[in-house]
Amino acid sequence: MQHNKFLEGKLSAVLSLTIAACLVMLLGITTEPNTAKGAAAVTVSATINESVTCSNTQSSITFGTLTAGAISTASPSATSSLSCNSSGGCTLNVQGAGDTVSPGLYKAAGTTTAQLIASADATLAAGTEGYGIQAATSSAGTGAVLTLNSKYRVLNNQVGGLTVTNTALASSSGPVASKEVGVTHKAAISALTRAGSYTDTISYSCTGN
């Protein structure tokens, strides 16, 4: 009897182990000890410096000889390129030198009196003094839309007047890469405009918004 009880115990133990092994296989239960004692977080950081750049394709342009009977367009046009990674975008500014006080095409005093062909928002007419610029964007570049200052977004014989301080020419609301603005210069004179050599120095600069 004792021998039978011993065999029954052994068989019961083997049966229990067999059932346990089957449950492990069927349910995916693992008997490996959980060795994890916690988790460590790793923070990854980086910094990107702000960059705002602009350049111009032309260092000089000319009207040639102005006559009272026509509205003249300088050649070639000036093209400015603008790039920035500022989250708020960037602005391309324009500034004319004029006579340092007022904007325009300026003839310094020499053998004759100094003269300024003033620059102002206007519709130019042959025989009437006037000078200004027109601006247009191109399809070049990528990124946010480049929006022109409405005073310079004009056509035909309309012009926007320059200023002797920075004035926004175009701006974006987000990052841009190699966006372009083309500027056309127009002028007209009267029969009384004094003879001489006239110049204006136009500067372009850019800032992040």
Image (tube, rainbow, N blue to C red):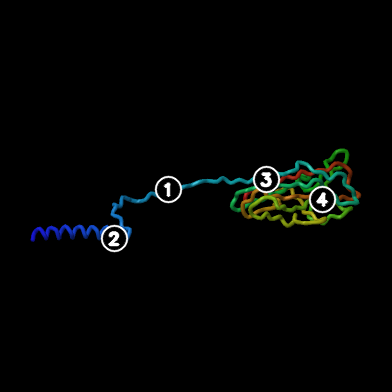
Q: Position of residue 92 (x, y in %)?
A: 68, 49
Q: Nearer the viewer, mark 4 or mark 3?
A: 3
**Mark closer to the chain start, 3 or 2:** 2
Report how far apart the C-alphas of labels 1 and 2 lie in the structure: 38 Å
Q: How many marks?
A: 4
Please name the residue that numbered disc 2 is placed on: 23
According to the picture, the residue beneath numbered tag 4 turns out to be 186
Kindly identify the residue that appears in the image at 60 percent across and 49 percent down: 85
For label 3, the residue is: 54
The kind of secondary structure element at disc 3 is strand
Element at label 2:
helix
Residues at circles 1 and 2 in contact by the CB criterion of under 8 Å: no
Residue type, label 3: Cys
Q: In the rendered image, which quarter is residue 159 located in? A: bottom right
Q: Amino acid at mark 4?
A: Lys
Residue under label 1, please give it: 42
Residue type at mark 2: give it.
Leu
Q: Are marks 4 and 3 in contact (CB under 8 Å)?
A: no
